[in-house]
Amino acid sequence: MGLNFDFIVKYLPWYVDAAILTVRVAFLGILFSLVVGIICSAVQYYHIPVIRTIVSVYIEISRNTPLLVQLFFLYFGLPKIGILLSAETCAVVGLTFLGGSYMSESIRSGLESVEKSQIESAASLGMGKVLTMKEVIFPQALAVSVPGICANVIFLIKETSVVSGIALADLMYVANDLIGLYYETDETLIMLVLFYLIILLPISAFASFIERRLRYAGFGN
Amino acid sequence: MRDSGINVLFLGKNFLRLLEGLGVTLRISLIAVLLSLPLGILLGMFMTLKNPVSKAISRIYLEFIRIMPQLVLLFIAYFGVTRMFGWNLSADVSAVIVFTLWGTAEMGDLVRGALISIPRHQYDSAAALGMTKVQTFIHVVVPQTMRRLIPLTINLTTRMIKTTSLVVLIGMTEVLKVGKQIIDANRFEYPTAALWIYGVIFLLYFLACWPISMLAKKLEKRWR
């Protein structure tokens, strides 16, 4: 197949803008997901009553519904009761709602992997709760959590592709637009794949690098 | 007017139509899962071979499928294949193909993980008992991998159900599209219909996936 390079050069700026939007939405969504995840996992780890129940209900709802449906509800449903959010805000809120539960589960599995004897030993050394968390639990939990967190980061970046469903001009939206307008399908799809690879490959490589480092530093292996 | 929006659900066959819409994506997920199971098991076994060529091929397949957003894969199958090979795939056929390719990759990786998790001494002990390779596989490897695999496979099903919601973006008439039709048809009589319809769709997906997730969690706990 002969590729139309004039077409590619002409519409490259569209893709660059769309990629910036994809990265921006993903970055904000991941950042807030981490915040939500840390809070939720802390609530569950310390067995804070009532809030803990709310957190587990949230986690079940968030993990068992598709992001696209969450976004449709936020973007088309909520304005009917006066909650009007811009498409980009919806995308970030939706991604946070979805990602928060995934992050929470990864962080919690790390926290729970730290054995009780470690905490008791810290207590017997006279360490307080904060100091135990900072010096004993956190560093060990991190090593267990990081691979899961990295997988979530990649998952969430991939999930941003559905924001085109609420008319945000991300990479998918531009590709759909160009296919509809000009029928240069090959070029459009090749560019789409390339741009996602440009965003995702370095992050995926970095994630496996970190994972290898962690395994190397692992306790007793 | 405030609570009138919910009534749109009970107009005519609206609720039934929504359920039928959900059925469209559930059917695609079910077909894709059923096809992915045997293919994924084969892929997983293929991946544990020591042959460098088979390793490279399966690795490239797995990495490409897993790094691309599923929506990109859908676009490639739906728009690209038509253009490149002249096959005019309908939206639901391309969806089944894409989700099977994706499911096979995910399943293959799960099977590979389960197979390599079996410690070497299990094989050695079986050999010491005079079991043949086939016997070892049937009586030692399969029962142990099954316990690990079944909960993960059930989880894959919920992921499949959630991901097939994307087919609306390649123009299939599924639950979100039906919802939109209902909202548009009742725009003037029920201005708040969107809240209720999308709320109900949200709930329907939850009701479809949650019991399956719970089952996976329960099995995982019991068989650990």
Image: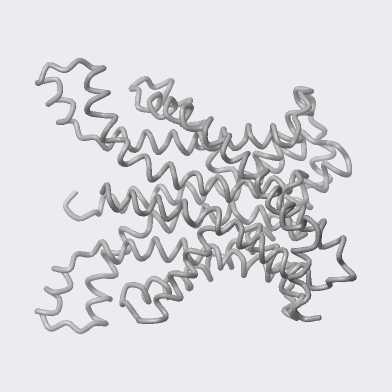
Q: In this figure, which colouring scheme has been used for the structure?
A: one colour
* Residue B163 location (% of width, % of height): 59, 48
Q: Quadrant of the N terminus of chain A?
A: top right
| Residue B130 shows in this picture | yes
Q: Is residue B137 shown above or below B206?
A: above
At x 60%, y 61%, the residue is A26
Residue A46 or residue A211, whichever sits in front: A46
* Residue B153 location (% of width, % of height): 43, 41
* Residue A130 location (% of width, % of height): 27, 82
Residue A61 or residue A106, whichever sits in front: A61
Q: Is residue A10 left or right of residue A137?
A: right
| Residue B64 shows in this picture | no
Circle count: 0
At x 71%, y 73%, the residue is A78
Q: Is residue B207 shown above or below A172?
A: below
Q: Is residue A49 left or right of residue A193?
A: left
Q: Quadrant of residue A65?
A: bottom right
